[in-house]
Amino acid sequence: MADIAPAAKIIDGKVYAERLREQVAREVTRLRADYNLQPGLAVVLVGDDAASQIYVRSKGEHSLAVGMHSVTHRLPADVSQVELLRLVGELNADPAIHGILVQLPLPKGFDEQAVIAAISPDKDVDGLHVVNAGRLANGVPALTPCTPLGCMIMLREAVGDLSGLRAVVVGRSVLVGRPIAQLLLQADCTVTIAHSRTRDLPAVCREADILVAAVGRPRMIRGDWIKPGAAVIDVGINRVPFDDPIKAAAGRTKVVGDVHYKEASQVAGWITPVPGGVGLMTVAVLLQNTVTAAKRIAGLD
Ligand code: NDP
């Protein structure tokens, strides 16, 4: 029997990310022409984690493609914390660099919090410095973590005015859950943050006009947890064996979200697929954050 056509409109991350990169490229062209200002991004990679290397290469390529100045510093895993902090200090002082991103996670033995704290808040394009988290919580201009900001751009463009809507964010991490909740609050949503101790999570989720899943548990959120017509933003990236037993037996894996896409897309009004949704926006927002940082540092924002 043929599958029933999904009810939900798909929020296509590729379309939104391409559009944002085009906007950033136009703004970079304008800043270079009008102010001789070329936004510069420095990415620091410590060690040789395979996934981190892919992310870092992608960040470098995309920043060059939009006309930015781009530098990648690759340090060996046995570099000392002091050396890493010295590099961060040099980048803080470098006038050609407006955004600094230290690729996380750092190898074992590093104090990540100390490294994040050493980045100038004005150049903290990952939005992880406590000064930026505090600014975001206070509702004043901040450099905002890229994935949460990407979710908001997609939500605003797909759904429109979010004011007064009930939003439930499942997950309370500093990287994703908390900043998304802050951004939804700024958009005048009524926000609930759920987590591993939340009682009757399905009932909490069913109240949501906007449901954001940032958990890290494959397909945890089922179709009957979703209010009909809700906007569902799936941040999760989980690697699981293929459903097909032959591929699974061969050890092949695929990426799925925190939401059971097949069930949820029958009920939701909008949904982000995984892959092809939120994940694609993250680098585009990093470029936008670097432009924002460059303009603020130059007094142009
Ligand atoms: P964390 O592990 O830091 O946080 C997970 C959160 O989920 C915690 O707050 C935890 O609650 C909560 N949680 C765990 N289990 C349950 C449960 N059974 N019920 C309810 N809540 C639960 O993860 P991140 O926030 O860093 O990432 C979340 C997901 O998003 C991951 O899959 C990650 O790969 C993905 N991700 C995707 C990005 C992208 O670009 N698309 C970027 C960053 C992350 P508690 O606090 O109580 O432990």
Image: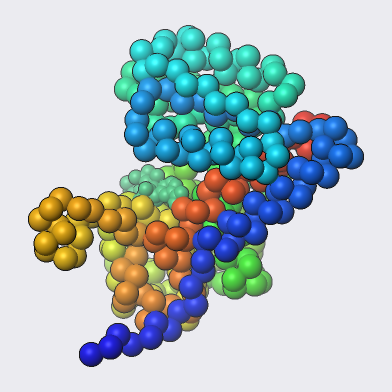
Can you say whether 203 is above or below 32 in the image? below
Q: Quadrant of residue 159?
A: bottom right
Q: Residue furthest right?
A: 34
Is any atom of residue 289 visible in this view?
no
Looking at this view, is 98 or 296 the one in front?
98
The residue depicted at 55 percent of the width and 26 percent of the height is: 72
Tell me residue 179's x, y (percent). 53, 48
Position in image of residue 149 (x %, y %)? 58, 52
Residue 244 appears in the picture as rendered: yes
Q: Report which quarter residue 39 is drawn in.
A: top right
Of residues 74 and 221, the one drawn nearer to the viewer in this rendering: 74
Residue depicted at 64% across the width and 25% down the height:
120
Q: Is residue 3 above or below residue 81?
A: below
Q: Is residue 140 above or below residue 162?
A: above
Residue 105, given in percent of the width and then of the height, sits at 39, 31
Establish if 256 lies above or below 299: below
Residue at x 31% of width, y 76% of height:
263
Q: Nearer the viewer, residue 281 or 74?
A: 74
How many numbered marks does the figure carry? 0
What colour scheme was applied to this rendering of the protein? rainbow
Quadrant that contains the C terminus? top right
Q: Is residue 73 left or right of residue 254?
A: right
Q: Name the image quarter holding the N terminus.
A: bottom left
Quadrant of the rendered structure where residue 234 is? Answer: bottom left
Q: Residue at (32%, 22%) from the top-left corner?
A: 108
Q: Position of residue 172 (x, y in %)?
A: 42, 49
